Structures are given as C-alpha cells and as structure tokens.
C-alpha cells in the first residue's frame, strides 16, 4: 500500500499552454467588447475622469512640499510622499473602480484584480517608506542635527527601512497569490536574528542615536554632565557622540553607553544653586548663634541673590557647623561662580563686624607623670618673696 502525496504536483507550463491562455484571454476580451461596447465606453469615460482626478491630486504633492519655505516641514513630508504615487497605480485604481460596471469576463476581472493588488501593495510600501524617512529627516532638521556621520546614518536607515518595507510587501503579494509564505517568513526571521546577533553592537549604537534624535535628552551645543565627566556636545554620530571637555579635550563615548548613564543637561537649567558650609567657634555667644541664619540671609540678598535656607548642621570637631543655600538668578555658570565669591567675602566681612570667629583646627598636647598626674609644660616658678624668706631662714644661726 503506497502513501499518497499530501500536495499535488505543480502543472507543467509549456509554450503551448501559455499560447492557449493568451488566445483564451484575447477571444474572451473580443467577445466581451462586442457584447458590452456601450458599458465599456462609459466605464472608460468614468475611469479616465477618475485617473485625471487622481493625477491632479498627485500634482498637489510638489505644491504641498513647496508651501514650506525651507521644504523641511510636515507638509513637505506628505507632499513628497504624494509625489511618489505611480501612474500605473492610478490607472489600476481607476480600472478596479469601473471594472464591475462593464461586467468583464472572469479572466479579465481576475487580471485587473491581480494587477491592482500587486501595484497597491508596492505603492503602499513606497508611501510608508517616504513617510518614515520623512519623519526622521524632519526631526533631525528640526533639532539642527547635521554632519557627515548623520548623513551616513540616514543612508543606512534608508537602506534598512527600504529592505524591511518592501520585504513585507513581497510577502503580502505572495500570500495573495496563494503561495505558502510560512517557510519564507521563518527564513527571513532566522536570517534577521543571525544578522542582528552578528552586528548587535552597531545596531545598538544606531538605535541609541535614533533615541537621542527622537527623545532629545540633549542637542548639539548643549552642556551636559554624565558620570564624573562634563562638557559640550559637539556631534551626535552614527555610533558615538563627541563631547568637548571643560579642559579642551575631546571625549568620545558610544551612544549606547551614554544613554545608559544619568545625564544632566546643564543647558536646560533655569537657575543654579550654591551651598556653603560655614563653621563658627564654640565660644560664639548664644545670641549670635540664634541670629546667624538671619545674618547669612541679609548678606545673600545684599548681593542680589535668592536666599533658600540656612541653619545648624552639626557639632564639628572645632566648630559649630552651619549650611547656607542660595540661588543665582540665571543658569550661567560664570554668574553663579562670581556670586559665590561675592557672598563668601561678604559673609567674612560681616563676621568680622559681628565678632564671630571662624576657627581652624587646633590641638593641645598634655604630658603626664608615671603616676598619671599632669605635668606642666614649663617649670613652676615660685614667688620672689617666698624664695627670699627661705634664704634668710637658712642663713640664721
């Protein structure tokens, strides 16, 4: 007993078979035209009107793109996508819309439907590619990203988007033709995983660059701090970001590693806060200690800064420690630096006027005898009259 094949063998396609199909199509078309010439004429008129209307709408694409003065707005993105509409797609749309009115034979209707499906899928892929790339370019231009590295990144992004979009379109077309695409999809998935694993570092940095562009944690020209480093962003590239350090050095860090860190965008500050630790002597009177926060506030406001808070912090080894916090009116670092200098010296002068001492660490050494009693660091000196009296007592008979 032999097992039957689950799938029937594919029919052989020969030249005679093709010629027969063409002949059948031609005869059916001639017979259809002869029997329905009036409906066909009306359908052609309606189809031509639809096609001309669609061509006119396609002509709005360049006008829509030119409406933006720079050609970089969203209107330009949609205008370029509309401009990419193919003439063959317009013709097939018109034919599909009027085919039912003309009552074509099955073979003609099937051919129109096949061609419409084919061109519609690839036209949709073209629109999707243009919109995706247009959105990315719009964001990069809006954020003033530029440079050769970004152009290389856009070239790679364009290639990847084109491959992905048209691969999906091809799978959709094959599926509509009745082809079993399960194996093809599985193969594409395995191949994509293999490529992703082989170039995961490159793709990670590429996607990190896209995240920087779209999420905008910083822009070119911003001053940022990450880890223990800081500097100004000079260029955001395909794989790395270049940062000019405060000492003039250029720091290069991969985009993925940079986004994994906590980033402080100093350019986006609206103010800067300064903290000063101030220690006063333990001998300071209690009244002055009570007034000290008010004294610090007066000196901060006298120098046109914004007072935040001041108060006791801890008992230090040589001083009673206070802390002062104040803010500059702008985010400029040099302004905050100068304000710290001015407030610090003003507090020092005020302490002199108030008699408040700022101690420095001191140490006293004591010497002990073997029995534990303290020994003075200098010899004891007796009073002069006691020494003279003792001398007279020794000289008396």
Image (cartoon, rainbow, N blue to C red):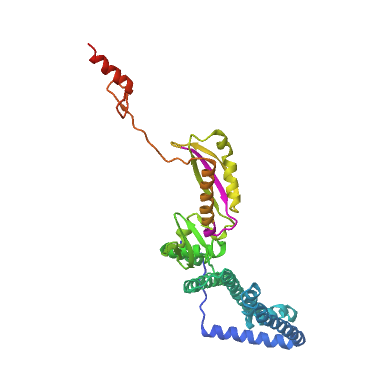
Give residue 62's position: percent from left, percent from top.
65, 81
| Residue placed most toward the observer, 222 or 146 | 222
| Residue placed most toward the observer, 77 or 361 | 361
Res. 23 image quadrant: bottom right
For this view, does 191 lie left or right of residue 384? right
Give residue 384's position: percent from left, percent from top.
32, 23
Q: Is residue 102 above or below residue 138?
A: below
Can residue 300 be spotted in the picture?
A: yes
Give residue 336's position: percent from left, percent from top.
54, 56
Q: Can you name the residue that lies furthest to the front here?
A: 397
Q: Is residue 126 above or below residue 327?
A: below
| Residue placed most toward the observer, 274 or 254 | 274
Residue sitting at 54 percent across and 49 percent down?
346
Give residue 216's position: percent from left, percent from top.
56, 62
Can residue 190 be spotted in the picture?
A: no
Q: How many marks?
A: 0
Q: Quadrant of the C terminus?
A: top left
Q: Which residues are magenta?
A: 319-335
Magenta segment: does it hold 245?
Answer: no
For this view, does 46 lie left or right of residue 267? right
| Residue placed most toward the observer, 325 or 146 | 325
């Amino acid at each position: 007993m032999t097992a039957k094949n689950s799938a029937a063998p594919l029919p052989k396609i020969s030249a005679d078979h093709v010629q027969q199909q063409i002949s059948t199509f031609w005869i059916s078309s001639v017979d259809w035209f002869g029997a329905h010439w009036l409906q066909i004429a009306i359908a052609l008129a309606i189809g031509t009107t639809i096609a001309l209307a669609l061509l006119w709408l396609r002509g709005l694409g360049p006008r829509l793109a030119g409406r933006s003065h720079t050609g970089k707005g969203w209107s330009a993105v949609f205008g370029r996508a509309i401009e990419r509409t193919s003439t063959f797609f317009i013709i097939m749309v018109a034919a599909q819309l009027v085919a039912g009115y003309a009552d074509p034979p099955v073979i003609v209707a099937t051919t129109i439907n096949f061609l419409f499906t084919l061109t519609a899928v690839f036209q949709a892929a073209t629109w999707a590619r243009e919109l995706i790339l247009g959105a990315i370019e719009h964001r990069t231009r809006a954020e003033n990203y530029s440079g050769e590295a970004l152009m290389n990144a856009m070239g790679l992004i364009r290639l990847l988007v084109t491959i992905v979009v048209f691969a999906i379109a091809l799978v959709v077309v094959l599926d509509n033709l009745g082809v079993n695409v399960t194996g093809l999809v599985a193969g594409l998935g395995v191949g994509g995983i293999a490529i992703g694993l082989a170039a995961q570092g490159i793709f990670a940095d590429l996607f990190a660059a896209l995240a920087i562009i779209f999420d905008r944690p910083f822009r070119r020209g911003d001053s940022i701090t990450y880890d223990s480093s800081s500097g100004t962003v000079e260029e955001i590239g395909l794989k790395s970001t270049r940062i000019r350090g405060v000492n003039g050095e250029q720091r290069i860090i991969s985009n993925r590693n940079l986004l994994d860190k906590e980033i402080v965008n100093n350019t986006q500050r609206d103010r800067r806060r300064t903290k000063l630790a101030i220690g006063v002597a333990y001998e300071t009177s209690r009244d002055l200690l009570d007034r000290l926060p008010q004294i610090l506030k007066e000196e901060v406001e006298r120098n046109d800064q914004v007072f935040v808070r001041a108060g006791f912090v801890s008992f230090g080894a040589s001083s009673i420690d206070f802390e002062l916090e104040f803010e500059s009116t702008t985010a400029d670092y040099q302004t905050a630096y100068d304000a710290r200098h001015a407030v610090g010296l003003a507090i020092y002068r005020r302490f002199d006027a108030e008699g408040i001492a700022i101690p420095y660490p001191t140490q006293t050494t004591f010497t002990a005898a073997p029995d534990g009693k303290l020994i003075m660091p200098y010899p004891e000196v007796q009073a002069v009259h006691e020494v003279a009296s003792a001398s007279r007592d020794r000289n008396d008979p």
